[in-house]
Image (cartoon, rainbow, N blue to C red):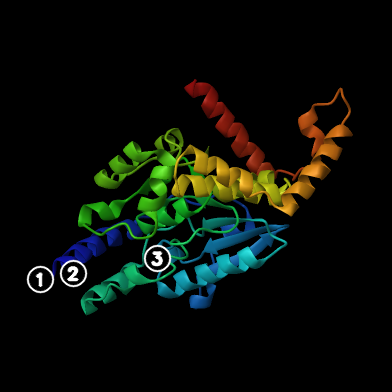
Amino acid sequence: MNPCRSCVKSLISFIRKIQEINPVRDLSTTTAARSDKVPENEEDTILVDKDESITLIGINRPKQRNSINAQTAERLSNALAAFEADDTSPIAVLYGVGGTFCAGYDIQELESQCEKGSLDFLLRHEGSVGPTRRHPKKPIVCGINGFCVASGLELALMCDLRVMEDTAILGFFNRRFGVPVSDGGTARLAAIVGYSRALELLESGRRIDGREALNIGLANRLVATGTALGQAVNLAFSIVKFPPASLIRDRSCLYTNAYSRQGFRAAMQTEIMSTSKEVLTELKEGVQRFKKVDPLQNKTEGWHVKEKPIPEWERQEIAHENEIRKKTK
């Protein structure tokens, strides 16, 4: 038997078990997160909505544990391209509907390609599960619940920030069956957690819980079960209030220096020479705003924003998280 076909068939058997697991119930009352809508056709597998200026993009294949096939990958790429072209939306939130973020590449399609001896899913320009082989132009926050494994984890690594529920699971489960990482995992993981940890996670293929993910920097926030989407949106709102041009500029510099390291001097040159007219305009406005702040007031409060109200369900979850932290100290 073809070695590739043999290892992919083993992967199919394993992922089928994973995708049959009933994950924790999604408790969030956010409209998009509560959606139990089963897509009637492929056009419903990616949901796009907006919360004020924040674009919400949802993977909506709950019966398949949000595994992604070719059509869904294309629609996800199109949704992110539309977000990048939307001047009214400086940040997006990516999430999974129905209790799982993403269980990887669709098992039925993978099986079909394996039977044909095809590896087309590895050769797509954008990536097998979306635009994972390019760098998004604007920040994306993802809310991780349930399983976020294999290429689903690579999709989460594509995002700038990761908000993870305490019962969620991450891992390169494809390692045990010889299926290679192909959606940017090897390009991004070391920049996020360091080479030593990246090698260990890639080579062992083991599962990573929320606490460890937070400790090693793979997750940016650890939240209670059912609150990933709401907390990811809140994190996005905490970012979107700032002047956008300088934020995008600093983000671009950081990514350039993380993935194109050519030494300290080259990194400094990137930082200095990337300042645009828009950044200088924001700088001038910021100085004037800073000067007008009451001397007795904290200077950092000079950038006034309208606070987004927190719903009661989220207040309860925050209080619950605080109680847990007190007990673990």
Q: Amino acid at mark 2?
A: Arg
On the rendered structure, is 118 left or right of 254?
A: left
Residue 65, position as x, y percentages in the image: 41, 61
Query: Which residue is located at x 51 percent, y 52 percent?
Result: 159
Picture quadrant where residue 94 is located: bottom right
On the rendered structure, is 284 left or right of 150?
A: right
What label does residue 5 carry, if any? 2
What label does residue 104 carry, if any? none
| Of marks 3 and 1, the one in the foreground | 1
Of the numbered discs 3 and 2, the one sitting upstream in the chain is 2
Q: Is residue 248 above or below residue 124?
A: above
Residue 227, position as x, y percentages in the image: 56, 46
Q: Amino acid at mark 3?
A: Gln
User: Could you classify mark 3 by the number of other residues whose Cα lies within 10 Å: few (under 14), some (14-19), or many (20 or more)?
Assistant: some
Q: Is residue 251 above or below residue 31?
A: above
From the image, tell me which residue sits under label 1.
1
Report how far apart the C-alphas of labels 3 and 1 lie in the structure.
28 Å
From the image, tell me which residue sits under label 3.
64
Callout 2–callout 1 Cβ contact below 8 Å: yes
Question: In the image shown, does 2 or 286 lie closer to the viewer?
Answer: 286
Picture quadrant where residue 53 is located: bottom right
Picture quadrant where residue 319 is located: top right
Question: In the image shown, does 58 or 242 lie closer to the viewer?
Answer: 242
Of the numbered discs 3 and 1, the one sitting upstream in the chain is 1
